[in-house]
Image (spheres, helix red, strand yellow):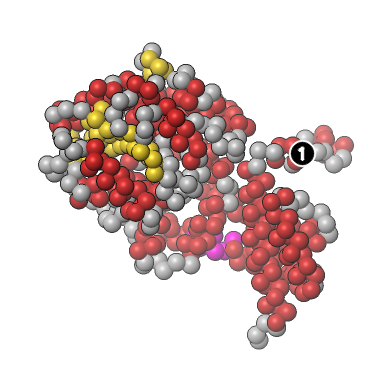
Amino acid sequence: MHKLRPLPLHLANAQLCWGGAGQAASQWLAGDLSWHPDLAGEVAALRRKVNAVGAGDFVAAVLQASSGRMQDLLAGVAAYQAHPWQAPERKRTVLVRHGTVQLFDYGGTGRPLLLVPSMINPPDILDLMPGCSLVRYLSRAGFRPLLLDWGGAEQSDERTRLTLATAVTEGLLPAIRAVANLAGGSVDMIGYCMGGTLALAAAALAPDAIHSLALLAAPYDFHADSAFNTARVDAMAQIIAGLPAGAPVPVDLLQLYFTALDPTLNDRKFRRFAHMDQSSEAAAFFVALETWANGGAPLPRAVAEECLTLWYKDNQPVQGRWTVDGQQVDPAGITAPVFLAAPKGDRLVPQQGALALANHLLQPTIVTPNAGHVGMVVGRSARKGLWEPLTAWLSATGKGR
Amino acid sequence: MNPSPDDKDAERLAEVFLDLWQRNLALWSTAPERADTLAVKPGTQADADDA
């Protein structure tokens, strides 16, 4: 059964919304409902139309329709849980394992590329399914992708002890050395999301080992967006602080943070899914993506706490105060060409937060796909918006090798 | 029995309302200013005892 985490939270959010809609309609008509100012125009227009049909009929219709929406949500969740889609068997070998980290080798004789995903979810977003895989696209373009897996399928002491700094020094730097051996020289590295920020640190610490660096939606200025919410970060830090000492942070708790970015999003997604042809490619894609988003292993405690404090709260990277292994993470020391992808509709890593890094680099190549954080990598526009420009840039940086 | 035109209007407006209502919840629950605007204010002394 496919997981939706945390299920009680998503169901409670939907119930809060639809279970209260009838009462909200009555309160609105009585002039006692607090609307967000952004909606004032639409609310006023609706009110004029409701006056024409009559309050009684309108409230009755709201009660019936809201009940239907709750039923749709439940049907969507049930259909997702029972959907027959299963992750494809991925043809890849393990090139090397060190500690909790392993490198998946997709083979070929082309130029090796090290891909570094986030630590939050599994690495498979970069190889989601046939026809929807950045890794496979790069492979077909003649490269030899090596996808880093942060591990976690089995909790180990090594993983539990990881910090942001040791993720770089004990996870990434050995991976770079392994790929350098394979490449016979410096390494081409692609980092996605927080994997990009960690890849940046590794490149800053070992600039001579890097031939090129592509950062996809990698956060750098955590306060760049006006919607940055200190209260949400503080609340999350408090919740994590309440876990037993040293205990890793469960996926459900991490999902709590992402759900807080828009508590109504899951309801809309799963109601839409309820009406999809369950045998369609689109439905399979939905299940693949949700399975990925709800997957993953508990995050090492220090990694979670440092993400919140050093990155989100103190915003150390853009201020030049983030240190790894006693060294400042200074992008100015990176002499390799850098590719920055900052999607316009990114709600997890707001575009300006990723673009801020450009001010600290020498002439980076910048693309701004018209997509969201995940859609940039696997959405319908991923090929044109990211895969093609990234591949062209990689080819250009590889000339003369 | 088919719904009357008025019923259809009410259903259509109900759907518009529900979309707005959900967007309203999303906006308030993610807006930085929500703590000021939606702060819990005890309505009665009994409420205050329970707060």
In percent of width and height, residue A252 lies at: 48, 40
Give the chain letter at badge 1.
B
Residue drawn at x 65%, y 66% is B15
Local crowd size for mark 1, using a 10 Å CA cut-off: few (<14), some (14–19), many (≥20): few
**Residue A119, placed above or below residue A20:** above
Give the number of callouts: 1
- The residue stretch that appears in magenta: A70-76
Residue drawn at x 41%, y 36% is A218
Horizontally, residue A179 falls left or right of residue A255, namely left
Can residue A151 be seen here?
no
Q: Amino acid at mark 1?
A: Val
Identity of the residue furthest to the bottom in this view: B1
Residue drawn at x 38%, y 15% is A327
In percent of width and height, residue B48 lies at: 83, 35
Residue at mark 1: B40
Identity of the residue furthest to the left in this view: A109
Residue B43 falls in which quadrant of the image? top right
Can residue A18 be seen here?
yes
Residue drawn at x 28%, y 42% is A393
In percent of width and height, residue A229 lies at: 60, 35
In percent of width and height, residue A114 lies at: 25, 35
Horizontally, residue A59 falls left or right of residue A146, namely right
**Residue A44, placed above or below residue A190:** below
Q: Is residue B1 magenta?
A: no
Q: Is residue A75 magenta?
A: yes
Identity of the residue furthest to the right in this view: B45
Image quadrant holding the C terminus of chain A, namely top left
